[in-house]
């Protein structure tokens, strides 16, 4: 049974603990651990998703809420990119990191090339990988771009396709004039729009996971199981792009909507708001493609789908925090309170609304619980959702 709209955190926490716990038990009995698709947007506020009252249509994000749970008081691990991502993956606040990753790592700063997530700073992805999950990151990293010891392939991900810096030119896949797009640790030069490239790669991975199986041990040939997977789709949208001013020889922040998405925008407001809305619309369409791929490949029922933003938005670049005070880079509600919707068919009751206070830090222990990994319970700041 799911308790709806309870005002007391204890009751809501108990409700979701029971919900996830029973789901985990049933999955274990079927000997088929759940897959996890985590979709992470960038600089998207509470007023930028239509199921939260926003004026930008996001039907595919909304469908996750309709098929599962919508959190009304969900908080990012930080109001800035790098510490937010550190908190999500490690379950610990960024001030505990060895390199004090409490601010954004700047791609062109020489001093920032020697900082990032360090060996020994455990991520839940590493634990999933050690437990037999195939693990993949597509899109933005922003937890270290110098030494390869900082890279996602050193922190639990079997594969990486995307950019290491905080933002990217959506049309050239460069940080200003500097190439920053990789397949694993090899620099590549893809052709296409960044959101579309990320989506295409994620779809390719989903097609591969649909056919993957775990070979039985020589002593037990009666059972063949699908290999569970974790796919982290980290869009840079609707964050501004990092263009290049040839006259000044400097990188510039510029909104870079895809023209075909821009013509679909019907929201009122400034041009920067329309540009921002176009990037949200394109990302939402991509999310719809990922959800359709799960259906098409028969993986929907055994996949937990999580959508959330890394922190709040800024009006300067077209974002809307839904009337909350503050914005990105502040600790007011507008900086850290973010949209988060989750579905897990046959486990999470469709149309659930949770008023529980929850955080990105909580995904580490919660995913450990539902996937059967050990979880580093002794040093986590997060708790079970």
Image: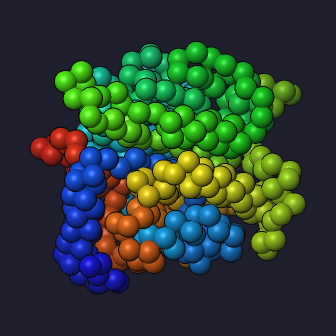
Depth check, front residue: 222 or 353: 222
Residue 40: x percent and y percent?
Answer: 51, 50
- 381 vs 303, left or right, is left
In this rendering, does residue 164 appear at all? yes
Residue drawn 55% across the image and 75% down it = 52
Q: Is residue 79 visible?
A: no
Q: Would you say 160 lies left or right of 332 here? A: right
To which quarter of the image does residue 73 belong?
Answer: bottom left
Q: Position of residue 49 (x, y in %)?
A: 60, 68
In this view of the protein, which residue sits in the foreground, 275 or 228? 228
| Percent position of residue 78, x then y | 40, 52
- Which residue appears at 40% of the width and 54% of the height? 302
Which percent across, then down, holds residue 99?
Answer: 33, 29
The picture quadrant where one finds residue 336 is: bottom left
The C terminus lies in quadrant? bottom left
Quarter-wise, where is residue 12 in the image?
Answer: bottom left
Q: Please identify the residue farthest to the front as the structure is shown.
A: 222
Judged left or right of residue 78, residue 98 is left
Quarter of the image that includes the N terminus: bottom left
Please tell me which residue is depicted at 36% across the width and 31% down the height of the picture: 214
Q: Nearer the viewer, residue 49 or 251?
A: 49
* In the rendered image, the vertical position of residue 330 relative to residue 207, given as above or below: below
Residue at (39%, 18%) from the top-left corner?
149
């Amino acid at each position: 049974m799911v308790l709806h709209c309870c005002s007391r955190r204890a009751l809501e926490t108990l409700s979701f603990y029971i919900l996830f716990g029973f789901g985990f038990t049933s999955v274990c009995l079927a000997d088929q651990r759940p897959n996890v698709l985590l979709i992470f947007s960038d600089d998207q506020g509470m007023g930028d998703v239509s199921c939260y009252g926003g004026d930008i249509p996001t039907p595919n994000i909304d469908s996750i809420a309709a098929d599962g749970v919508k959190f009304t008081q969900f908080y990012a691990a930080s109001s800035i990119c790098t510490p937010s991502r550190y908190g999500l993956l490690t379950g610990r606040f960024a001030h505990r990191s060895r390199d004090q990753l409490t601010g954004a790592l700047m791609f062109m700063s020489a001093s920032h090339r020697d900082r990032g997530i360090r060996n020994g700073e455990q991520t839940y992805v590493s634990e999933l990988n050690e437990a037999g999950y195939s693990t993949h990151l597509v899109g933005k990293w922003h937890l270290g771009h110098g030494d390869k010891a900082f890279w996602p392939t050193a922190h639990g991900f079997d594969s990486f396709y995307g950019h290491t810096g905080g933002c990217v030119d959506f049309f050239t896949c460069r940080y200003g004039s500097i190439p920053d797009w990789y397949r694993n640790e090899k620099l590549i030069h893809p052709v296409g729009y960044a959101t579309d490239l990320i989506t295409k790669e994620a779809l390719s991975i989903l097609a591969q996971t649909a056919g993957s199986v775990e070979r039985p041990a020589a002593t037990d040939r009666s059972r063949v199981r699908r290999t569970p997977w974790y796919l982290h789709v980290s869009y840079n949208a609707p964050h501004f792009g990092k263009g290049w001013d040839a006259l000044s020889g400097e990188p510039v922040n510029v909104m870079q909507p895809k023209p075909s998405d821009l013509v679909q925008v019907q929201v009122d407001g400034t041009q920067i708001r329309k540009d921002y809305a176009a990037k949200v619309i394109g990302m939402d369409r991509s999310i719809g493609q990922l959800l359709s791929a799960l259906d098409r490949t028969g993986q929907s029922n055994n996949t937990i789908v999580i959508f959330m933003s890394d922190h709040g938005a800024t009006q300067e670049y077209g974002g809307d925090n839904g009337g909350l005070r503050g914005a990105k880079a502040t600790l007011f509600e507008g900086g850290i309170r973010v949209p988060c919707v989750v579905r897990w068919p046959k486990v999470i009751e469709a149309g659930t609304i949770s008023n529980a206070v929850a955080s990105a830090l909580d995904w580490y222990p919660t995913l450990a619980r539902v996937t059967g990994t050990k979880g580093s319970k002794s040093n986590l700041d997060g708790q079970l959702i």
